[in-house]
Amino acid sequence: MPAHRLNCLVRGIDFMKRKWFKGDTHLHTVNSDGILTKGQLVEYCKNQGLDFIIITDHDYNSVEESYYDGDMLVIQGQEITGDNGHVNIWGKKVPEEPPYKLDTREDYETIIEKCRKAGAVITLNHPFCSMCGFRFNIDGLDCDCAEVWNTIQHSDNMKNRDWWVEQLMQGKRIAAVGGSDFHREYVPHTKLLIASPTTIVLAGENTPEAILKAMKEGRSVITNKPDSTMIELTCGSAVIGDTVKFEKGISVNINLTKLMPYHTVTVYNNKTAVYSFNSGAKYYRQICFDCEVAEKGFVRAEVTYNYTGMLKTIYKFAEQKFLGSKNSEELPPFIRAFTNPIWFE
């Protein structure tokens, strides 16, 4: 098992001059069913230290063209919304006007194809949400990304994660993203829901083209808040989203910051956990280690935690009451942060 190198220096990789940009990809205003105006929402997000946001009102184009408000980028988006599932359209206007016909899978395929031809990035939203997930089999549905983590962490997101991993196992390079699906703060005077989760994107610059391209390529890490646990996964000069030639003895490097007590970091080579470490009662400001790649396919990393005792009971009740979860089993381990994969061929 690899030795930990605490407080290590990040390896001298310049990532081809790329930088990490923090964003929220799924936000609503009063133009659909949120309670903030576009201006109020933008200010709220700027105060969270975000570099970019995507406003995705239901069946409404609140942002006619992407723009900057100070240093923060506001990207055009829309959430195509039907009883059979929700799809985020990023970067381009939906090339038809609502109400949309969304009665069958074929209806979704038709409008997605139109958005694809217009140059938009396509994301399947909260696919296994108990309240508003897809009501048909989404395997093979055209998309660039899947919203694996929607709003605060709950059991339905683990179903999204499991489906995404199955797609990766089939060689489908669907990029994982996260979005807060923010409408309002339901607990007054808190900032629990905004930018929860945060999608942190490795891109050359903070422009709509660069951010959306990087997300399509799987160059994102999803974490629970802008200043929370972060995982950098590399293989030499290769980063998440890259493809590396597999050879015996090849290793990945994990540089992890802000590992909380009793959280577990796990590195997966395909579905096999090739490394796992629990922090115990200790908080790790930084931990860095290498891990050998055993076989072709992909490598990804995630940090998980468990609710226990009375907290588990309370949280299970809350997610069933407020998030519509139909999970009747024990709460699964929840994700604190996870990466998209590096591919090995």
Image (cartoon, helix red, strand yellow):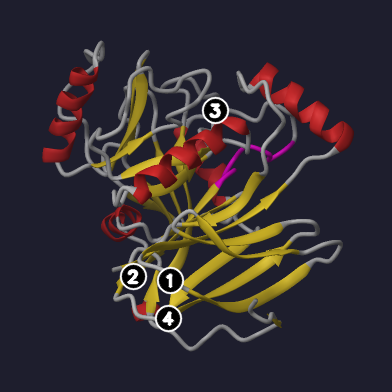
Which residue was labeled with disc 1?
A: 19
Whether pointer 2 and pointer 1 mark residues with C-beta atoms closer than 8 Å, the reply is: yes
Mark earlier in primary sequence (4, 3): 3
Can the viewer see residue 54? no
Report the mark closest to the observer, 4 or 1.
4
Mark earlier in primary sequence (2, 1): 1
Which residue was labeled with disc 2?
A: 204
Residue 57, picture quadrant: top left
Between the C-alphas of marks 3 and 2, the distance is 30 Å
In the rendered image, residue 336 lying in the magenta stretch gets the answer no
The quadrant of the image that shows the N terminus is bottom right
In the rendered image, residue 192 lying in the magenta stretch gets the answer yes
SS class of the residue under badge 4?
Answer: loop
SS class of the residue under badge 3?
Answer: loop
Which residue was labeled with disc 3?
A: 183
Residue type indicated by callout 4? Ile
Report the mark closest to the observer, 1 or 3.
1
Whether pointer 4 and pointer 2 mark residues with C-beta atoms closer than 8 Å, the reply is: no
Check disc 3: other Cα within 10 Å, few if <14, some if 14-19, many if 20+: many
Mark earlier in primary sequence (4, 2): 2
Decide if residue 1 is on the left or right side of residue 209. Answer: right
Whether pointer 3 and pointer 2 mark residues with C-beta atoms closer than 8 Å, the reply is: no
Q: Residue at x 45, y 71 (%)?
A: 294
